[in-house]
Amino acid sequence: MYFNSHTKIGLGTWRMGESAITQSSEIQAIEHAVSIGYRLIDTAEMYANGQAESLIGKALKNLGPSIRPSLTLVSKVLPTNASSQGMIKACEASLRRLGCEYLDLYLLHWKSSYTFEQTIEGFLKLKDKGLIKHHGVSNFDVSDLKKWSDTEKSMGLSPSESLATNQVYYSLGARGIEFDLAPHLAREKISLMAYSPIDGGELMRHKELAVLASSLNITPAQLALAWTVRHPNTVAIPKSVSKSRIEENWASKDLSLSPQTLATLDRLFPPPRAKTSLAVI
Ligand SMILES: NC(=O)c1ccc[n+]([C@@H]2O[C@H](COP(=O)([O-])OP(=O)(O)OC[C@H]3O[C@@H](n4cnc5c(N)ncnc54)[C@H](OP(=O)(O)O)[C@@H]3O)[C@@H](O)[C@H]2O)c1
């Protein structure tokens, strides 16, 4: 799937919509993100039982219809809904909440007990109906992707009908995927969407990261995000409801890190030396 400089950093929405008290400021935060240039928004039917999607729908309504074609809207189907029929109902419900006619990218949130064949059939039906443009998965390791690809082949699908994205946990504090998953995605031309790229805020407590960021006149979040999206195949979706942090995170897309900075980060957050099980939040 094609991502560009406007979709390098997207907006995550997990934990939005959970409280009626904060909803209007969350809608304003989403509107602010789009108004300063964000074009990628990540959500899921699971987030606040659909309320995160509803907030995005309200923000998009306030922004007006002309904005929709420029956006890349991503949502995810729950594994319990990932049957061929269940996905149609789930996607239609997501679209109703979002107030949109289609999703740009629809992901299987994590592996389900339905066969891959059933879920692939669901994605293909949704494409035929014009309800989604691309599909992908989340929290899939190399072995899952190989099995998925074998299923596609057995169904006689062409490469253009294959996965656009795998959304996985990837940050300075969670580098395990660099051992084999990230190279596999690059080889297979599947984009890597990094979730929890600042470790849910945990990285902000890392003293040496703060010192390094300060020496570069940037913030620790900007350093962590610029590092996460340093490869062209990777985008990141930090979540924030603060307008200033939304701006801070957005600015990281234009930063490039020197070999010296990358080496220091490798020392502080060593890359994996062996296969580890896929980290999941
Ligand atoms: N596919 C999956 O299974 C999966 C799993 C987890 C997450 N996700 C997606 O990935 C998105 C991002 O992951 P995440 O929300 O877990 O974690 P994250 O984006 O790494 O961190 C979000 C936390 O960091 C804070 N924060 C954001 N920007 C900051 C900054 N510049 N300085 C200091 N603190 C900052 C936020 O607080 P404020 O809001 O107060 O700024 C929030 O508490 C989610 O929202 C969701 O869309 C997907």
Image: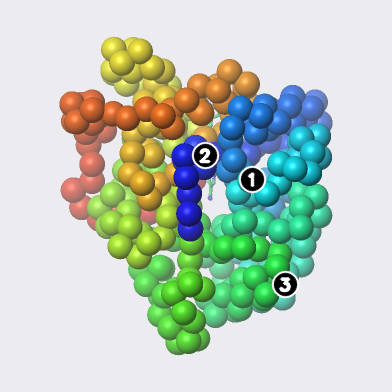
The local secondary structure at tag 3 comes to loop
Q: Does the residue labelled 3 lie within 8 Å of ligand 1?
A: no
Asked if ligand 1 lies within 8 A of label 1, the reply is no
Picture coordinates of residue 4, whole percent (x, y): 47, 45
**Residue type (three-letter) at the residue carrying disc 3:** Lys
Please tell me whether residue 207 is drawn above or below residue 107 in the rendered image. Answer: above
Which residue occupies 32% across, 54% down?
182
Amino acid type shown at disc 1: Ser
Does the CB distance between marks 2 and 1 fall below 8 Å?
yes
Quadrant of ligand 1 in image: top right
Question: In which quarter of the view is residue 60 placed?
Answer: top right
Helix, strand or loop status at disc 1: helix
The residue where tag 2 is placed is 6
Q: Which residue is drawn at 71% across and 64% down?
A: 131
Question: Looking at the rendering, which quadrant does residue 231 occupy?
Answer: top left
122 relative to 55 in the view: left or right: left
Q: Earlier in the sequence, mark 2 or mark 3?
A: 2
Residue at disc 2, secondary structure: loop
Q: Where is residue 194 in the image (x, y as percent from the top left)?
A: 44, 45
Disc 2 + disc 3, Cβ < 8 Å: no
Question: From where the camera sits, is residue 127 visible?
Answer: yes
Give the number of the disc on residue 201. none
In the image shown, does 263 or 201 lie closer to the viewer? Answer: 263
Image position, residue 14 (x, y; %):
62, 40
Q: Write down the residue under mark 3.
A: 129
Distance in Å between CA atoms under marks 1 and 3: 21 Å
C-alpha separation, residue under disc 2 versus residue under disc 1: 10 Å
Determine which residue is flagged by label 1. 70
Q: Which of 150 and 73 is in front in this view?
A: 73
Judge from the rendering whether residue 159 lies leftward or rightward of residue 215; answer left or right: right
Crowd rating for badge 2 (residues with CA inside 10 Å; few <14, some 14–19, many 20+): some
Three-letter code for the amino acid on which mark 2 is drawn: His
